[in-house]
Image (cartoon, grey):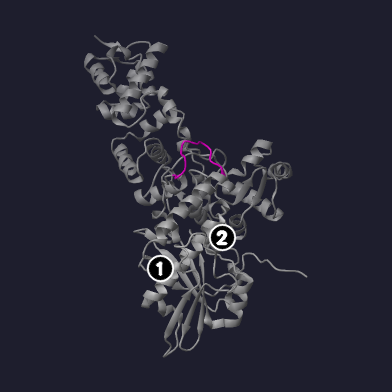
Amino acid sequence: MNNYALGLPTIISIYNISAASLAKDLKFSKSTVYDWINQKKKLSSTNLKKLSDFFKIPEHYFISELSEKEIEHISNLRAESITKTVELPISKDSKSLLKDKNLILLKNSGKKSHVDEVVSYMYHINHSIPLKSFVSYYQEEMKKSGIGSSETGTYHKTVLPRYFGLLEKDKNNISITSLGKAYHIGNIEEKIEVIFTALQTLRFGRYNNAVSSNSDVEAPLMFLKSIVVLGSITLNEFGCLLYLTHNMNKSFAEAIETLLKYKKENKVLDLRDHLKELELGKYFDPKFNVFFTDLGIVSCDKKKNYTIPSKILSKYRDTILNFDVIKVDISDTTQNICSTNDYSMSLNNEISNSLNEFSSSITTNSNINVKKANTSYSNDTTLNKSSKFSHTKNNIELDSSVRSNLGWNGEKLIFDNLKNSTDFLSYLNLKENEVIEEITWYNEGFEIIEDWVDKSIGYGHDILIKTNLRLLYVEVKTSYGSTSYSSATTNELKLMFNEGENYYLFKISNFKNWKSSTKKIDIIIENNPIESILNINRIKELVFYVK
């Protein structure tokens, strides 16, 4: 018996499939399917069965005027069919399963022009101001620029700059950071370098200054890394990756593998639609993709595939591949909002535990990368390069005990290598027939004696090397992360000045990599540092007396 396909238009709408796709999948002609939809032709019993088998719903739905209850039933059947092939929560009720984890992404404009406007404004103010004053002062500027002037809209324009560490909100005040200053005065290549510095030093899943997220997933890092790994990615595919890593707790590699399976089975759009039903549509509109595109970090073609331009890829490919896109938090992950104090405590604990393990280990190792310092600093490098950026980990201050312990462990690393590594000694530029007779480290034994007091205070150096011809003075500066800048005391500067070529500065960065199998501790050695330190283009900040 032949019947008109009264329910077919509603069914293909629920299943998000076009008439052309249906015709292709079931090997019907397009005109036949369109005739069914427009009720110009009736369905034969054979074709009705084909439709029922394809959609996995009862035949009578296709030839009936569907009630609201029947439409709801079909929607539920569709959700269940997706669940069988795609790893998803079973129904809308499963939203409750997602409440314990909260991945917050940017909600407002991702345009570079908006970022530039706000950063420029704060750059010229150049000091911390109350947030209310910022909103009041800048509303008129926003209105002139045509980018909104409401109080809420004005405040929201600070979110993206804060997300990438260009501005910082502290309680009720807002200020520009060193990254923000470098971003403002830099050309486009230098702006990109600023953003990559932010990507390497800030957190985006937790402890971000702009969003109160509670996730191990570092979304902007994952976006770029997935492009490098896959060659390109759409926002639909990236949204699926966020779901697989954040909600399904898959590793990045597992999520990529699962995504490739979904692509092969044409299930990406099914997953996207179901996630939108679970009110997770934010995964497919992260906003930072717009900012990255405006900067030229990524490009987007007509099919909405995001790729990384060859110029960016050639410079930053290794950096991107080294991104740690899922960072398991060491503090209580049940809290939805973690304060800066929470992060400070967890970071201090992390460093303290790592240092305790290091101090009891053999520290002469091959896990270090040593090079001589670049002492050439021209006028146009001021505040432009990532080596001078100080905005790291939201400027978290280490406890004094942890800071001292870090410094002593850095000295231990240098001392042990000076004593036991011939290659290391080659960086000292010893003269012909010059022989080392004795190496003295003032803080030797700090790891054994409780409540150790720094023994190098007042000397202007940490390690003294006695040769048969002279005395060499070694000062060690240690950073747990990638920070390149250091400070110097009055005694250190005086000794540098007086001893000249007999003085060596050892700058240790990325001390956290001491037991990594893939990453190394970076050590830069500079002889006679006073000559280059007093170059105005190398000074981040100067503190001096006025009498």
Q: Position of residue 275 (x, y in %)?
A: 41, 30
- Residue beneath the point at 41% across and 28% down: 97
Q: To which quarter of the image does residue 425 belong?
A: bottom left
Within 10 Å of disc 2 (Cα), the crowding (few <14, some 14-19, many 20+) is many
Residue 309 shows in the view? no
Q: Between residues 434 and 405, which one lies in front from this camera angle?
A: 405
Q: Which residue is mark 2?
A: 389
Q: Residue furthest left?
A: 46
Residue at 42% from the left image edge and 90% from the top image edge: 432
Pointers 2 and 1 in contact (CB under 8 A)?
Answer: no
Q: Which residue is mark 1?
A: 369
In magenta, the rendered stretch is: 329-339
Q: Position of residue 423 (x, y in %)?
A: 37, 77
> Residue 279's x, y, as percent?
46, 29
Residue at x 43%, y 27% (from the top left corner): 278
Question: As rendered, which of 412 and 131 lies closer to the eye?
Answer: 412
**Viewed as shown, does residue 208 lie left or right of 238?**
right
The spot of residue 30 in percent (x, y) is: 31, 26
- Is 336 a magenta residue? yes
Q: Nearer the viewer, mark 2 or mark 1?
A: 1
**Residue 384 drawn above or below residue 149:** below
Element on which disc 2 rests:
loop
Check disc 1 and give the amino acid type: Asn
In the image, residue 327 sits, relative to residue 86, either above or below, namely: below
Q: Which amino acid type corresponds to the residue marked 2 in the rendered image?
A: Phe
Res 322 quadrant in image:
bottom left
Q: Nearer the viewer, residue 423 or 68?
A: 423
Q: Is residue 46 above or below residue 469?
A: above
Q: Secondary structure at mark 1?
A: strand
Image quadrant holding the N terminus, namely: top left
